[in-house]
Image: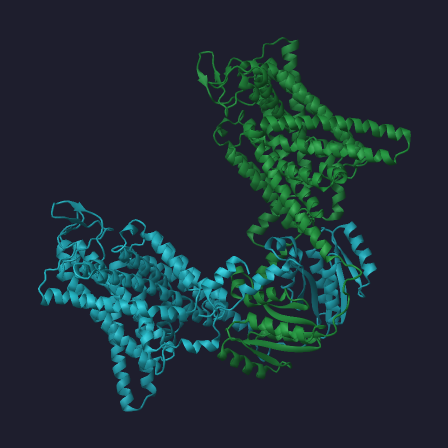
Chain colours: A cyan, B green
Amino acid sequence: MNVLSALKRMVVGRRLANAQLGETLLPKRLALPVFASDALSSVAYAPDEILITLSLAGMAGFLYSWEIAVAVAVVVAVVVMSYRQTVHAYPNGGGDYEVATANLGRYAGLTVASSLLVDYVLTVAVSVSAGVINAKAMLPFLQGYEAWTAVGVIVFLTLMNLRGVRESGSAFAIPTYVFMASMLSMIAIGLVRILILGQPLKSETADLIVVPPEGTGEFVGWAMVAILARSFSSGAAALTGVEAISNGVPAFRKPKSRNAATVLAMLGGLAITMLLGIVALANLTNVHLIDELTGTHYVNAAGETIHSAAHTVTGQLARVVFMDWFEPGFYIVITATMLILFLAANTAFNGFPSLASILAKDGFLPRQLHSRGDRLAFSNGILMLSAAAIVLVLVFDASVTALIQLYVVGVFLSFTVGQLGMIRHWTRELRTEREPKVRGRIVRSRIINTIGATATGAVLIVVLVSKFTHGAYLAVVAMGVLFALMLTISNHYRAVERELALTPDSDRALPSRVRGVVLVQRVNLPTARAIAFARAARSTTLTAVTVAVDDDEVELILDEWEDEDFGIPLKVIASPYREITGPFIKYVAELRSENPRDVVIVYIPEYVVGHWWEQLLHNQTALLIRTRLHFMPGVMVTSVPYQLKSSGRAKAAAHKASQPRLR
Amino acid sequence: MNVLSALKRMVVGRRLANAQLGETLLPKRLALPVFASDALSSVAYAPDEILITLSLAGMAGFLYSWEIAVAVAVVVAVVVMSYRQTVHAYPNGGGDYEVATANLGRYAGLTVASSLLVDYVLTVAVSVSAGVINAKAMLPFLQGYEAWTAVGVIVFLTLMNLRGVRESGSAFAIPTYVFMASMLSMIAIGLVRILILGQPLKSETADLIVVPPEGTGEFVGWAMVAILARSFSSGAAALTGVEAISNGVPAFRKPKSRNAATVLAMLGGLAITMLLGIVALANLTNVHLIDELTGTHYVNAAGETIHSAAHTVTGQLARVVFMDWFEPGFYIVITATMLILFLAANTAFNGFPSLASILAKDGFLPRQLHSRGDRLAFSNGILMLSAAAIVLVLVFDASVTALIQLYVVGVFLSFTVGQLGMIRHWTRELRTEREPKVRGRIVRSRIINTIGATATGAVLIVVLVSKFTHGAYLAVVAMGVLFALMLTISNHYRAVERELALTPDSDRALPSRVRGVVLVQRVNLPTARAIAFARAARSTTLTAVTVAVDDDEVELILDEWEDEDFGIPLKVIASPYREITGPFIKYVAELRSENPRDVVIVYIPEYVVGHWWEQLLHNQTALLIRTRLHFMPGVMVTSVPYQLKSSGRAKAAAHKASQPRLR
């Protein structure tokens, strides 16, 4: 074991067997933090994005932040209620993909799958970027290095995710609870200090005037509606991650559905409380943000123009609430916020390969991705996710405001399709259900999901219209490409399955005889082994065949053949073009056509070597011959490997590459 | 047949069988032009390079051109005499590589091989660049596009060289004879006009004064010697290609050696005549060249400085000799010069893959390059040569003066080693030879080769010393890399051969029984075929094995298995990590260790598909299993291919890729 593999073992941790999977079932107290990180973390950047978008309308814009927060909170409530129905209906894990596929067909399922895959990438990019920007309130030296810091975090998460789910699961609990506690405390303390104690808390940006970029006219009528719609669309990012629980029902302890629904309700309550609390506090302390990307800027009391963005809302609030009496509070809030954002990114590292595995099982992705234990497949999934997220972070310079334009489309697309699927689900249930009490429940569920579908559909349209040209089109294009790719793969698998199905008419006749042919290129140990094995297999006939490329070589081979006495005849084939493949293929083809009811088995000695470059120096002819023989029906190709001493190294590598990997 | 393959057939031409090779034996009248192109073409740029280097010493430098030309001519005479000995001693084609290997061992042979491979690349780059620069005298619009024109010519030659040697052979004759005739006529007419008719012919650069770059002091003493040495080294480029005949003796009609020696003498005479004639004429017409690269420049009668290079010597001479009375003569000389330079490049396209084939036979390059008929190998050789030459042309901007710094080292290295080999050859002959008359001949030959070795060795030292820092080091580095690479390959093959040799102690026992195992992943036609074939092979035991990755899938397989009644038992292996490879490998390993004297044959159904991306969607597990089984002694892996309909396309492609290619 070399240093690298030791390091890998250290990072990757020990493997888990299927039997150990039971241990990873989550009690509610652990399920809450596991799923909370994704859902609640978005509360850390949604208020910022609301304020930043509103800054386009100058100081007047901020007046609307309260209304937009309430609108987002209402949508959160609707979505949580809707998904509680899903959790009850699909106790075995009803992700939107399964719900859409089961009720609306494969195209709907594929639509959801495409948007989810894109969203996983964006979750990583947005959460990590938001975490880094938040951290700046505490670590000002990060200024200017945001993108590379974010890349570093993603690389770290990638390495961590070569560990199992259990380790990550427990690691979630503490920072998530600290985040919830510190955030709620901050809101409560802030409100008490302002509203009850009457303290005049002012954020660090309270006295800065926000000015829209020059040339921007007054925002009235439709222009104002457009700003409000975009602000709402960005705020709707607060909903990301809410649906994760519906995928994760099987991970809950029994009663799975009820526990999951309970946790979902808790999450919804927490998200709404935090969102409204933060926006309220931001209003009361006069937090003013600017949108660097569009050129809104500050003017300070001295009349000077400031173009650089201020700290995040959380950063400003934590400072104003805690800094003057309990400094550690500030650091706790910022640290917890940063950590929960990184944990949210981590959930995508779990979700992406799992979804890929399900898609592979359904034939939308290469089948070998299905096998859960395939270390290669899972590692590849993690690496693909990581690479895509890193590209996004670098291209958009870790700007949450820019990335969020791409983000929310996929979320609401899968919400909407999922809810439509649920409506169909309940309608189907109603067809068979006769019990009035149960029917009543179903009708009620259907109403809830109809409200959910309508609300999420409306948000989807608002998001699409208000953000399409701001970046959402990129997400739409990516989804379209994934959709087409997966559909092509699926169609291919289906066509192959049809072609390969055993039917009553399928030919089941056994070949009558077996004709063995050993390819001889030189007389040595691999050839001797191939002949010995071929003789042991006792085919009807067995011939050794060599192709006469070089006269001297053929004579040498014939001499050595006589000395060795292998017990089978050696046939020399002429090669007018001095090549091996063609004449040999022709010989096999003739053998086939002379004995059409027989099967031909071609034995090829192969050298098993240790390095890839050694591989280039051997077996090339064998490879060419094998490839061409594969196109000939009724011909089996048998490799008789001979292990050279150097193969030990490669053996270990091959063993390692095919080792199982469990999540 | 699609458009592309039709086009390819058109460009590549029909194939030639071994039997047709006889037709390509060359009579002297064809052998002369075939080999002349490489040897004589260098006369087209050697005088230029002599004058360009001398220009560093200003007008005074040109006074030495005559002495240097004579020195080069003497070396040509010595080398030609030396190689006439080689041709007689090695009638089967005694290239310097064979001579060095046979007499001085593999390191010497490898040294020659490395320098020859590098030289082939430089021959293409230098000849094509020189041809393009020559053409500028006729086609002035090429100015500024030299490099890209040269690249175009190389690409054209690459395409042409997908045709056979015969077509190229005949195509050589006409332009080469035209070149010889027109060049000799030009020299003769020029000398007659000046010396006998007393006409005052003045070249276009006669009245331009050449001034060395500022800051260059007087060239006296060692500095002048250095300039002269470099000028001589560049002029020595005239010798490139002289040795080619010794490689090509087998291509001559009988008596091969004598004919080859005759042609060699003719070539030597022509080369010397042309070289001396051109330099004489250049002196008489006052041709003055400058070295753009080092900053020498012209000053004209009006005192103006001119930095751009003039036409080539050939271009200037053809103009002054012909333009005033027979204009077509000018165009004939320039066109023939250009064509013979391109033909010289073409010879490298023949030589490079041939040498690679010989090196492969001797185990210095991957063995599959040996098979002459392998279209892939030859095509790859041509493409590698072409790519390397294109890179050189672009890097050095098609400057012959720059490229020639790299060129001559390899030529003289192989000359010297070859001649040293010949000395050793004659010494060995003397040991066994008793006939005094023959001994006398041998002693005389040895003296000639000793003179040859001394002369070429001296030139090699002059070239190395005078050009090393000017670019020759690049050629030396390239040769060193090739040397190390080929030595590594050779050592590998030798080690493998030793390891694989059949010895009296080798185990020749036949395995006692054959245990058949069929890998089942689903129940379909490929599996059914694999089972049918495996049953036909009648191994001692035969078991179908499936790995339980997914419970639902296993149940499905078991159901279908019962329906089908394949006649062999199906064993289900548990997979605690939900992966296929590991448990299956473990099963086979156990089967092996329970029956150590038996051989296991594993049947793997494989899907033969049409596109590379389809390949990605299938057979991945099979590939992984096959790779790992290869490391297990006593296990054969049999692919049972099932051809899907889409495989037809790929079959045609595989057939084409393995088609023979004859040169």
Residue B451 as seen in the image, left or right of residue B529? right
Locate the C terminus of chain B by quadrant.
top right
- Which residue is most to the bottom? A435
Q: Is residue B608 visible?
A: no
Question: How many numbered discs, if any?
Answer: 0
Name the residue nearer the viewer: A386 or A118. Answer: A386
Q: Residue A638: which quarter of the image?
A: bottom right
Task: Write the residue at 63% across / 54% down.
Answer: A614
Instruction: Specify the quadrant that holds the N terminus of chain B.
Output: bottom right
For residue A155, side relative to residue B48 (left or right) = left
Does residue B333 appear in this view? yes
Which of the 4 image quarters holds residue B453?
top right
- Relative to B142, A631 lies left or right: right
Q: Residue furthest top?
A: B198
- Quarter residue B583 falls in: bottom right
Q: Position of residue A205 (x, y in %)?
A: 16, 54
**Residue B471: percent from the left, percent from the top?**
56, 31
